[in-house]
Image (tube, helix red, strand yellow):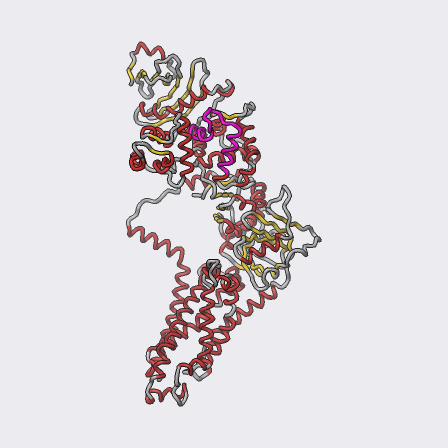
Amino acid sequence: MADVKTDDENNILKDRNHETSIGLSSSSHLSVVSEESSMRGKKTARFSEEEVVEITLDVRDDTVEIQDIRGAGDDGMDLTSQSVKGGKLASKLKRVTNGLRLGASKRQTGAPPARQQRRLDRSKSAAAGALRGLQVVTKYVTGSWQDVEKRFDLLAVDGLLIRSRFGKCIGMDGSDEFAVQMFDALARRRGITKQVLTKDELREFWEQLTDQGFDSRLRTFFDMVDKNADGQITEEEVKEIITLSASANKLSKIKERAEEYTALIMEELDPDGLGYIEMDNLETLLLQPSGSAEPSNTQTQSSKLSRLLSQKLVPTKDMSSFERFKTNVSYFLEDNWKRMWVMTLWLSICIGLFAWKFVQYEHRAVFGIMGYCVSTAKGAAETLKFNMALILLPVCRNTVTWIRSKTKLGAVVPFNDNINFHKVIAAGVGVGVLLHVGTHLTCDFPKLLHASDAAYEPMKPFFGEKRPPNYWWFVEGIEGWTGIVMLIIMILAYTLAQPWFRRNRLSPKNPLKKFTGFNAFWFTHHLFVVVYVLLVVHGFCLYLTKKWYKKTTWMYLAVPVMLYASERILRAFRSHDAVKIQRVAIYPGNVLALFMSKPHGFRYRSGQYIFVNCKAVSPYEWHPFSITSAPGDDYLSVHIRTRGDWTSRLRTVFSEACKPPNENESGLLRADFTKGESNCRFPKLLIDGPYGAPAQDYREYDVLLLIGLGIGATPLISIVKDVLNHIQKGGEGSSGSHAHKKPFVTKRAYFYWVTREEGSFDWFRGIMNEVAEKDSDGVIELHNHCSSVYQEGDARSALIVMLQELHHAKKGVDIVSGTRVKTHFARPN
């Protein structure tokens, strides 16, 4: 209820440049005095009780700003720029109610005068930064109050909502435990001890949760930490919430150092040593100028430009179905035009060869008995010969690398898809085998066996004077058994090459499991030597072709087989000498880092990879790994994630020779060797390479956007190091790289690394610190994202965010990564 005072009562007002003075107490009776002015008005509300709180508001058009809050004998609290927008003054005043409650609560806690008089910067930028850390549950609470009301009607029992259904009722699906904690905090604040809520109480909870004001969110967060509702957060409560937050976000290192971080927070927020923290202490931390104590190297932070770009990523306007289809087609063509013309050329050649042989056999005598079956079989055989020759070219790694690096063909040929093209050709081989073998066994041979003597007469020069008596006649001949053996090997190799078998995904109880895995894939694939020998024999002993120059199988295979054989010989000679191990480190997340000497004359580009062989693990297996060192480094390094049998055994072999690291070293186990020191206890490593990869062409671009997920960041780390080496050399190329004719054009690099595990940052900690220290011009911008942590704005990570800011401001080190690069939480936009 409100009544309007007359003008003679306006003597209670102080005209402060048309500002507004409002007095409030605990009474519910509100009096309002109004006096209009042209652009700004002054409005007063006061309670009828003796004890009053005076609030000064600045009203401008559609905005209300809280200028000051004063009590009896109080010097006031500066709350400048706490603004509220709305259509009517009544709604505006309702929005600032939480701010008034906060002011009252501060008086009740009895804080020392020095703390009450602290003036906080309530500017928009400071408050906005704090709001991001106290967003609490807004993004998890879905729908409007009408939706919540409907869910209440469905979930309530006798008009009461039980505590366990609170999260579901407000739309916080999947966060039941957190919703219960929120329920307890809101209930404590209101003195509610029962485990149920009425609809009116739920409405009050809802309004606080959806209130976008800073003070409301701060109050909610404070209540969650303040378990005993005494208005003070003790050191034990701080430690408890740090431990719980670390556990919820899977941050084991922070959990282990909870006591240290608790002391840091208490030192900052409890300088008087009272043993507890109050609301104004927490508010001081949140509203302190952003980055006021940050290290000077700004390249370790998210740049304003990248933040603005991320914020501008908004959905495009809805398009019509035709426009959407046209856009999708244009994007598809832009991304796949290289693949499309290569596939079109390949299919055209296959179809042309098939048609040529098909038509040719329509005019042969054998067509009178076997008909289109023999034409189909011979057409398929011609495509088989072509594809069996072509399938070797994509796996000639040295040739592909040379063509990619030394020629311009990479502009039109998708060399990055060489393995995919190898698989496509294998599918073409499968189709050819199915047509060739299928038509022979089910059509050609039965027709020949059942042909009349007159019809068989033209076949005597090819199959003999007597007609073949049965199927076994075809099988026991050279043409028959060579074809059957090839078919069996192909089926075996093709089956074990499928991801389900190659990656050993079968159930442990499956008896076939021991016959699968990478070894099974590798050995069966190398039976191709037998297949090619049999293919030449099979193609030379033909029933229907007797002249040698018409037996073209060897002509198709000669060049590709010689090229591939040369590649294998080159690999054997190049990988003969073992590299010397200089350093070994085993990191969290089952990652093995190997630092080795660089072989004489070994040249590579960042982004390329090598094959590694360890005879102590397996004398025959070679596995590819991205190079993580830069061309200018005097060593060669790879980071290997333990995934399968071979990598597990490799990690075990090297871990036996390692020991725990010193305090200033990273990793779980380490082994370092100085010059001249023997490392004979380590197994010997052979390497083969380098080989080309998609990322190697980064030098052609002035701006790099590098995005790595988990261990997939390894080739990008090498690029980051190469760019850093280039910066240090003042624009010269890296000494260890190829002699590049083109200048180094990269002017800016953005590196985004997303990983699930906190320990993953140990893998490249040294590189990140090196970038932060030496990249004074801010050429490289690093963005680390830990996806196990709830994103900024979630109450479950709110304390982690504050702790991160405080620790980085004090010591310049991030609490998650242990580097000078601050870690972002959750996935990037």
Relative horizontal placement of residue 3, taking residue 665 as reference (left or right):
left
Q: With respect to residue 251, does 467 lie above or below?
A: below
Q: Does the magenta stretch include residue 554?
A: no
Q: Give the range drawn in magenta.
A: 218-246
Q: Where is residue 506 in the image (x, y as percent from the top left)?
A: 46, 59
In this rendering, does residue 792 appear at all?
Answer: yes
Relative horizontal placement of residue 616, taking residue 698 as reference (left or right):
right
Q: Where is residue 72 in the image (x, y as percent from the top left)?
A: 43, 13
In this rendering, does residue 299 appear at all?
Answer: no
Q: With respect to residue 347, does 367 lie above or below?
A: below
Q: Nearer the viewer, residue 96 or 551?
A: 96
Asked which quadrant contains residue 690, the reply is bottom right
Residue at screen point 54% across, 53% down: 642
Q: Does the magenta stretch include residue 232?
A: yes
Q: Which quadrant is home to the C terminus?
A: top left
Report the magenta stretch's main SS.
Answer: helix
Q: Nearer the viewer, residue 738 or 595?
A: 595
Q: Which of 37 and 584 is in front in this view?
A: 584
